[in-house]
Structure formats: structure tokens, C-alpha cells
Image: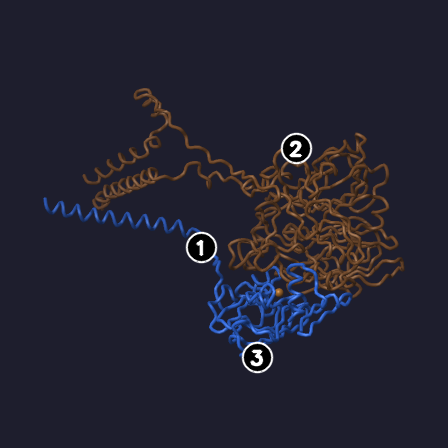
Chain colours: A brown, B blue
Amino acid sequence: MRAVMMLVSGALLGVLVFPGQWIPAELRFDMASVFGTPAYRAPAATPEMSAGMTPIDTMCPEDLLGWRSAQTIEGVEIAAASTCSADNPYAIAAFVKGTNNVSMETLLRAGLTPDALEKGADLDGDGDPDEIHIRLEISELNGGSPDAQEPVVQYEIAPGITPGLWVFSPKSFGMATENFDSNIANALLRSPAPAIRVEQGDHIYITLENTHYMPHTIHLHGVDHAYRRADGQGNDGVPMSSELPVQPGEARTYEILPRSAGTAFYHCHVQPQSHILMGLQGMFIVEENRPNNTLQSMNIGAGEVRVRSQASRETYDQEYDLQYTDIDSGLNNIIQQTNDPARIEQWLHGGYNLSSAHSNYFTVNGRSFPYSFRESLVVTKGDERIRLRVLNAGTEGLALHTHGHKATVTHLDGHALPEQGQITRDVFWLASAQRMDLTLDTRNDGVHSYGSGVWMLHDHTGKGTTNDGIAPGGNMSAIVYRDYLAENGWPITQGEDMGMFFDPAFYRRGDRDSEPAVEMNAAFFLRLLALGFAVALLLTGFVSLLLPLARKSP
Amino acid sequence: MRFGAEFGLLCALLVLPSAALAQHEHHMHAEGADGSRFDRTGMVMNTNTETLPQNCEQISADLEWTVRAGTRYALREAGRVFGYSQVAFEAPPCSRITVRFINEDAIRHQWMVHGLPRYLYPEGMFHLEASGGQEVQGTFIVPGDDATYLVHCDITQHMEKGMKGQLTVGRGNGDLWSIPGVTADFNQSSTNPRGTLMLLGVSIMLGMGVLTTTLIGKQDKTVTKEK
Ligand SMILES: [Cu+2]
């Protein structure tokens, strides 16, 4: 009897606190025909998307150290940077002269070690050094930690977006962050790996000092190199075929003597399904041999080449290195989820399945929009011939579209095309690992250029211009004419206020479950408690009803 | 001391260098009278052999430590790849410490002490850095109060993957987290198998059911007895 009471009262209470939910839809229609339709109740308001207006100066931070200005350091004339953010000019000077040929002061300001990039003898007697020794380390950005609750040594590709990254970096000294109180990576440690520039016929030594906790190699894709060094050591960087990988704490030197010039690619070849995509990828450019060739042998984070080669000066007015890639945060964030390298290795090997993965971030020179607008704009005064060296280092195809311009492809994978093969068009398709040298002609003739303005330059594959599916983002940059460029290097646009794109909330993916439309209030809480009580009544009533039956049955 | 201090300032703030540094232009080797240096072998910064911290009357002791660095000193079972031959350092207040830092790997490593008084050590840091296979040496004086200082290598992920130690001056002021073999990691990975939460929920519901039914059963019995 007591059990039946419990069942009935439980059912009643349940219906009382949450009436609508318990009545089947068909019954509700019948009830409405008898009792009338329920009265209107205002739905809870949808919480507004926070689009806080960020002050304009955070769109383009002030150049406090004067890195943008034209300057002469160690006798090296460094052109002014057009864009808002620029590389450290002391590092540029050291990369031109060689870190062994500049003053202590320059090195200290550059953050480089004396052996980071050594330049030696002039072997062919044409007025420039031909012995080049480059030392690369490997840095982990946005990595894991046994203690911290956020990624360590942070590098934002876009506001609030910090995927785990492994990058080749020049040999530097001191702290990895800006200072001890900061968690922001210093300017030398960034994505992508530095674009390396050498001269045809140079004797080049590249030492990989593996400062990382995983084994790595360097594979020179498209650069003329011998399969083995003279002493028999493997020189191709492929663990399966040419040599064992360089273990943590170890170093190995690759030797190359490139006989041909062209735009190429270097990357790690250990577990290529993950290490390249983790960020171990960079541009490798072999310039044509010229007398007195001034080469900026490293271009940190790629982008505008501020000290150009003789060959570039002969034919072009400007030169840019543009490295496109894509990131799958499902892969890259593995390193943030555990501090145990053995576990990381297991998850990279068998836990992550590239064949069913999709990239969700798309970068040009290591940044996505809006940060790509700070450093990867192509700036022109008009009537210029601009060389764009383009690499697609990602897993997905790149449909590079130049708004307002038709560019001309002159080289594919570092090899010059015959005159009749040099196609002029406005969308260029680059498959994974392909390189393309484009000539951007900014003469206003209705074909090569439609005139002055802020013309977008981006991947036209749709998701390429999003940050995890949210637009505008991705590898979007622009071709900007000087009359549309502010003094600080930010483009003068006349569309939407770009401030909102600098708010990390703009790119936070709205999760339907995690962001409830209705807030918990006291009344709802009480109703929920009562419902719980009703369910308990029903359960115990049901059990105590069955218990005597169970006792009787044997 | 001056030379070292300026080294630190220059690196940190990129201010104009001192005359002392300017003299070293176009030489790939700089060495101060106090042992500060920056060359191909590495870097010794913010050394201090003479100047007493404010709360010290005299040097209390002279200590000499040899620290080796490399992957062979890693605590592998704890998921560490890099390591120091020693991670727990103890020193009396106001002692002068000379560290000989030997790098047994073929890559760079550092031995940095953080949190020292900034009026003596720019950025509060004493800094030894050795290139692959190199050895450097430097001296500094610790302050007079009980404190525990972080010792680490700041190359990305070297501290996280093992190159972390602590310098306890006097009684110190509490151990740091994740010192290999000494203290625990703050982020403990879960060791519970899959489905733990679900099983816990089911067992709580079962327990509640059993308890309530036995209670009701007892009441029913008393009711029947009364009848
Ligand atoms: Cu280290």
C-alpha cells in the first residue's frame, strides 16, 4: 500500500514540477482542444556574442625598438619594413655578414650565438663568402608542462590561438621567452622556420643541434645535395633509407653544394605524417651566383626580404617569401596534453590518424588573419616588379588568389619555365610541397593590376580563410598600395572595423552544449530538486512493490 | 661585476652598450675581469664575486659545485629527457658559490638561477650557458634570508623535460614543484581506467536503492507486527 502511495505521489510531483515535458505531443493537442492553448511565455534571450571593440593601437603595436626603420648596421644597408611588425635589424645584419664577422654588441642585440651562422672564405674570388655554416636548433612553442595550466613559451598564430608547434630556429642564447616574467616566445623563436638563402655553388654546412626531446632530421627537398657525405654519413635526412635520426642532445652536419638555383623546401623527415605538420618546415632558397652577392642568409618568419641578392636587384624591385601551411589542432595540441615524451610518441604514432583528419587553421608565414595583416602584406608603390616565392608546406591544396591582379608564374619547384609556359592568371594552385615563383606586376594596365587599393591575397579554398571555420581568418593577407597604407604599416581600409577581429572571443567556437541559452536560477534549481525527489519516490516505490513478489516466487 | 651586469641589461633591455663592451667590438671573444664571458663556448652572465647583498655582513662560506648536464642525467622513468647531475642544491645564507658547469651533450644547455635581488643581478638572474661539449664557470653570492630559488635551463622544454632544480638557501621557503626525483608534478595525469565515473554512479544508485528498500521493509514489518 505504502509502495503504491509512493508511486502515485512521485508521479504526481514529477508532473507538477515539469508539466510539459511529461505529456506526449499527441496528448497535448487533445488537452489544448479541451483546456485551451497555453498562454505566451517570453523565451530567454540569447546571450550576445561579445565583440568588444579593441583600441586601434593593439591592431598594430607601436614599433618601440625601431625595427621597422631603414638603417645601416655593420655596413649592411637594411631597407625599411613596410609592414606593421618587422624583424630585428641586428639579426638581419648578422645573417648578412655572418655571426662570426659582426661585433659583440650586434650579436647581443640580435640574440644569436657567435656560431649561429658563420661565413668563411671566398672560394671563387668574386667578392662574397662561399663557405657557409648554419646551426639550427629545434624549439617547441605552446608546449606542455608538468606544472603550468596553459601552454608554455607562447606564440599566437591569431588572437588567443596557440596550437602546439615545433620549429627549426637559429642558434640563440639566453631565455626562450621575452623575459623571466613573460610566457611569450622571444622574436627569434617563431613559426615558420627561418627561410634560408644561400648562393649557387656555395659550400654549405647545416648542423642540426637537436635541442628537442624527440629525434629529428633535416631533409632538403628540391636542393641539390649528395645522398651521402664524403665520409659515408647519410645526407638525405630520411630515417628509412639514408640515416638514423638525430637523437635529443645530439648534433649532425649536412653538407650541400647546390649546382642549381631555385626555391626549395627543408623539413624534418622523421614520422613525416606528424613532424612536418608540427611545424618542422621552412623555405630554402638558392640564389644565382653573382659577384659581391649580399645574401640575407636567414629570413626570420619568412616575409619581406629586407636585404636582397644581386640577382633579385637586377630583375625585381622587391622580394617576398610566402610560406603557406595548415594546422590540425587535433595533432598539434597533443604535446599540451601530457608531459611524458613516451606518451606523446604513442599518440603521434597510433593515436592520431592523419588519414581521417582535417586541418582547421591556415597560416601564411606562421600567422593567421588578423595577425597576418601585421607582417605579411605585400606593399607596393605601383609600377613595380615584385618577386613572390611561394611554398605550400601544408597537407591541403592552396588556391592562391590575387585580388585586382594577374600575376605570372616564372618558376615551378625551383625550375624556370620556358617563355611560352609562363602563365598569367589570378588563381594559382599549389599542391602539397610545391613551390612557385610569381612575378607580381603592379603597373595599372587593366590586366596585371587594376590600380591602387587594398587587394586581398588569399587561399580561395573556402576554409583556407577561416580560423577553425570562423571567417575572416586563415591565410588572408593583401596587396596594399602605398597610398592606402598608414604610417605605422596598417592598411587604410573602408569596410568593417577590424578591431573586433583582435578580440579572442571572436574566434572562440560557440559550443551549443557548453554555452546554455538559459541561466540556472533558484526556481529552476528547486524544481530540479523536486524532480529528483519524485524520481527517488518512484524508484523506491517500484522496488518495494517488486520485493514481496520476489520473496514469494521461490 | 660591472661587465656582467651590463651584459644582462643589454640582453634584456637592448640599451646602449657600455664602453667596456664597445672595446670588445670585432672580437669574437669577450671576457670580463670577474669571469663574465660570451663566445663560442657559451655565456657567463651576472657574476658577482665581491658585492655583498644588503642583508649580508660578510661572506659566510665559499662553495664550489660541479654540475654536469645532459640527456644521460635524465630521470627516464618519470618521462624526462634532459637532466642535471644534481638538482637539489643547498647553501648557507650569504655564501659565495662557484659553479663549474659541464655540458656533456652536443647541444646548448644552461644553468640559470632566478629570483635573486635585482639590484645585484639584472633581471634577478645568474646565468651559465655552455655550447655542446663545453664547460663554463661562474661565481655569485646568495642573499642572507632563507629562500628557495629556481634553477633551470630555459631552452624550450628543457625544464619541463627534466632540467629543473632548486637552490635552498638556509632553510629555504618551501620546495618547488616537479623537481625530478624530489617533488611531484603539479599536473598529475589520471591513473583511473576508462568508465570509472560511470561505474561509481551506478554503484551509488544501487546502494541508495538497497538502503531505502531495507528501511521500507523494516517499517512494513513493524506495521504488520502492530496489526
Ligand atoms: Cu638545456
Query: Disc 1 is attached to a residue of which chain?
Result: B
Q: Callout 1, which amino acid?
A: Pro
Q: Is mark 3 within 8 Å of ligand 1?
A: no
Residue at 53 percent across and 56 percent down: it is: A338
Looking at the rendered structure, which numbered label has been put on residue A494? 2
Q: Residues within 10 Å of mark 3 (few under 14, many from 20)?
A: some
Image quadrant holding the N terminus of chain A, namely top left
Estimate the spatial distance between the alpha carbons at disc 2 and disc 1, rounded to whole Å: 57 Å
Whether A308 is drawn above or below A234: the answer is above
Looking at the rendered structure, which numbered label has been put on residue B193? 1
Looking at the rendered structure, which numbered label has been put on residue B62? 3
Relative image position of residue A443 (x, y in whole percent) = 81, 35
Do marks 2 and 1 share a subunit?
no
Relative image position of residue A182 (x, y in whole percent) = 58, 56
Relative image position of residue A393 (x, y in whole percent) = 69, 47
Instruction: Say whether residue A553 is left or right of residue B194.
Output: left
Name the quadrant where ligand 1 sits.
bottom right
Q: Callout 2, which amino acid?
A: Gln
Relative image position of residue A167 (x, y in whole percent) = 66, 54
